[in-house]
Image: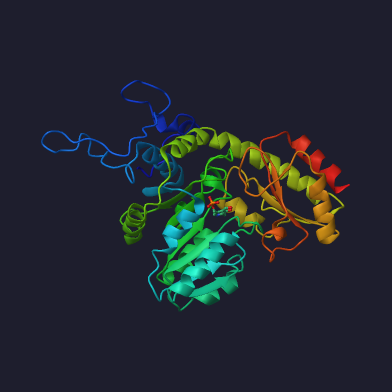
Amino acid sequence: MSGKNTKSLATHFAQAGGAIDPTTGAVVPPIHNATTFVRDENYEPFSPDHIYSRDQNDLYRLAESLLCEAEHAQAGLLLPSGMAAVATLVRTVPNRGRIVLQSGIYWAATKFVREFCARRQVELVEVDCADQAAFREVLEGQKADLVWIETPSNPYLKTVDVAASAKLAHAAGAVLAVDSTAATPILQQPLDLGADIVMHSATKGINGHSDVLAGFVACRDASHPIWELLKTDRAGAGAVIGSFEAWLLVRGMRTLPLRVERMSENALAVAEAMHAHSGIDSVLYPGLPSDPGHVLAKEQMSGGFGSLLSIRVKGGREAALKAVGKMQVFKRATSLGGVESLVEHRHTIENTVPDDLLRLSVGIESADDLIGDLVQALG
Ligand code: PLP
């Protein structure tokens, strides 16, 4: 897997990194469902890269190399879900270690980290990493094993300074990991900003069609000891995706740059319309100049600000739920990053989120239809 981005990402993804089947010339890679591969009469493997498919699968390798190239990573792993990537990463922390975790991020990741730390006597510090002073205070002059940030964060869309976080983490002897799911590898490359690890729920924008669960974790430097730990963990714990799912993921990625461009444009148009709407208290979206993270997001993201935003509806829970009930174009469902727009009342499943907040995942539909739907729903 090379770390150099030689072609534009549009060409790279559209042509699946030049993946032409060498035996047939097919422009689409084949799916091999075999779990095992023969050896010759001298007991040499027929192909050294094909022994047993738990960890050796051409489609994993293809997906990994596509994403590594986009992230400028030297090595990466495909996993069966974003949470599998979270778990693989957290399991690298030694017993009685220390984790500094951004507060207010994807709730299931927080839950997993909390439970892991309690079981392994790992000290856990949760802090708002968008607040530089607070972040510095928990790291300066102290040791840590892992610093974990999520930018833009879900569902509050906070922007965290990756370069500054890397400096703080490294001074504390820690690895900096960035959950870059909401940005996708198209809009942000955390490894270029000094992060050691980037991870994604590939279920979201990377696949983009709400039909595959997948995760991805990648390292800037394959000689960093954490790479061996991650690789061994996937092979040993057997956290692998099926061949068909990996194939679907590669197919989805062919349009990744195009989708992200359109979704980001739509999300900005929706955010601007909601910002100007009298029924909305506030819009959380780093693309808006009024957003506290806007200047930073402009520096560390390029090509757009992503498809995720949250709106806080005037009138509280009742008004928010009433609006959701009236939506017709936005579908009432969890998740994000798909071509179809979704709306979620997060408080219903995560009660620490304000009950007037609606999270919007903006798809590739017409922006006018999306804005029209929201305007009619808000009355
Ligand atoms: N990270 C973020 C930011 C997410 O939003 C999610 C899921 O919503 C995950 C990780 C977990 O991903 P998955 O659902 O693929 O396990």
> x, y percentage for residue 282?
78, 57
> x, y percentage for residue 222?
33, 53
Residue 303 showing in the rendered view: yes
Relative to 268, say whether 347 is above or below: below
Residue at x 71% of width, y 60% of height: 347
In depth, the one of 1 and 7 nearer the eye is 1
Of all residues shown, which one is farthest toward the left? 42
Seen in the image, is 193 located left or right of residue 61? right
- Find residue 354 and report its image quarter: bottom right
Labels in figure, total:
0
Seen in the image, is 65 located left or right of residue 298? left
> x, y percentage for residue 184?
54, 46
Seen in the image, is 55 located left or right of residue 363? left
Of all residues shown, which one is farthest toward the right? 379
- Find residue 157 and report its image quarter: bottom right
> x, y percentage for residue 126?
56, 71
Residue at x 45% of width, y 59% of height: 87
Seen in the image, is 335 located left or right of residue 315? left
Q: How is the image coloured?
A: rainbow
Residue at x 74% of width, y 37% of height: 367
Residue 8 showing in the rendered view: no
In the picture, which quadrant includes the N terminus? top left
